[in-house]
Image (tube, rainbow, N blue to C red):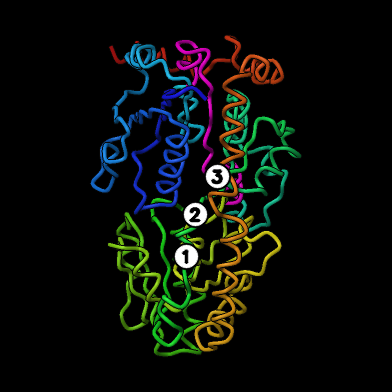
Amino acid sequence: MNQMQSLLIIGFVWPEPNSSAAGGRMMQLISLFQKQDFEITFASPAQDSDFMIDLSEFGVQKESIELNNSSFDIFIKELNPSVVLFDRFMIEEQFGWRVTENCPNALRILDTEDLHCLRLARQKAFKEKREFQISDLLVEEVAKREIASILRCDLSLMISEYEIELLTTVFKIDQSLLCYLPLLLESNAIPDLAKLPSFEERKDFVFIGNFLHEPNWNAVQYLKETIWPLIKKQLPEAILNIYGAYPSQKVLQLNNVKEGFLILGRAENANDVVKKAAVVLAPLRFGAGIKGKLLEAMQCGTPSVTTSIGAESMQGDLPWNGFVEDNPQHFADKAVQLYQDAATWIQAQKNGVEIMNQRYLRNSFEEDFTTQIEFLVTNIKQHRLNNFMGELLQHHTLKSTKYMSKWIEEKNK
């Protein structure tokens, strides 16, 4: 690939790797493109936050941009990137048509994070107290927007094999438009278990997760109302430490010292917190993608108990780093077993290392990713000819987001 091609990342938010897996994921993508000698500009319409990373420390140019404003057209024409990466489909809706008009030859990549339509359809089914059905996706309004965004882009990055299967079978998306790229680990991030705190040195249960993410808030409610009382019945002295960025007042109100249910807010160092804990609890009842908190638990040598939603697409055919249980009583029983039984705990810890080595090492994905980007940059015209539905969705009669944006821009003058 030619040296110093340019990449523009348009972010939904500024990266906060210490607040969420999404922030860590974005920094991984930046690293992958820098390895390919891309000069990177990160632009976002989001407000600065107290916990956003200093992009300049990573050699990335930071630019603030506005929604529904033609100043972006001037900005991107001057930048003239060879590749544009949209952080989630909502950003592609807002800026994709402007990229297409002003830099038609730029490769357009969508980082889905997770399939939003899957998460929302599951959430809706949960709130309606019924089982999620695949047909729920077909009537989910967000699905129409998200699938259209995937089709308009030249490549979509997917972190979950299950979601790729849904896209190819339910929505008939061509495999050439998708790239499986899970959360990635450097080989030196795989722990030497002998150097981590032992079973005997650990104490307490822990939950960790960003509270701006609805599945995390729901999981904490579930712990409070259902699962934690079942664990406390068997372990009266047990404590559950709950950490997470951006806790609301309703989250903080769940704090109860007497019950050993402690809401502790943002963790200064998430790794330290998880390494000291005996067991991670993650009873997620809806959601999508793969779970950064559970991969982090494996890195910290901390076994976890989660649900089938929590473990989805994470372990392949390998045994879990603990237990996967959807029944609340079974969930509680397995959590107690891990907490009390050293042999079970140690085996779960080893399972986590095996999962990381076989499924998340950066070395396993980097070369294929680089090859795919190089191929698309070189063969973009033919690639787009093969994606007729995508070209159809770029047609002016279907650009509702473009004309909505132009209307808002005029209204704001």
**Residue at left offset 67%, top offset 37%:** 139
333 to 144, vertically: above or below: below
Q: Earlier in the sequence, mark 2 or mark 3?
A: 3
Report the amino acid beneath label 3. Answer: Asp
Where residue 155 appears, as percent x and y from the top left, is: 59, 30
Q: Is 123 within the magenta?
A: yes
Residue on which the image places disc 3:
114
Few, some or many residues within 10 Å of mark 1 (<14, 14–19, 20+): many
Q: Secondary structure at mark 2?
A: loop
* Tag shown at residue 299: 1
Residue 174 or 83: which is nearer the viewer?
Answer: 83
Where residue 106 appears, as percent x and y from the top left, is: 50, 18
Where residue 13 appears, as percent x and y from the top left, is: 36, 38
**Residue at left offset 48%, top offset 24%:** 83
* Tag shown at residue 7: none
Q: Secondary structure at mark 3?
A: loop
Q: Which residues are magenta?
A: 96-124
Few, some or many residues within 10 Å of mark 3 (<14, 14–19, 20+): many
Q: Earlier in the sequence, mark 3 or mark 1?
A: 3
Q: Is 46 within the magenta?
A: no
**Residue at left offset 35%, top offset 29%:** 43
Residue 326 placement, left or right of 18: right
Residue 73 placement, left or right of 353: left
Distance (Cα) linking label 3 and label 1: 21 Å
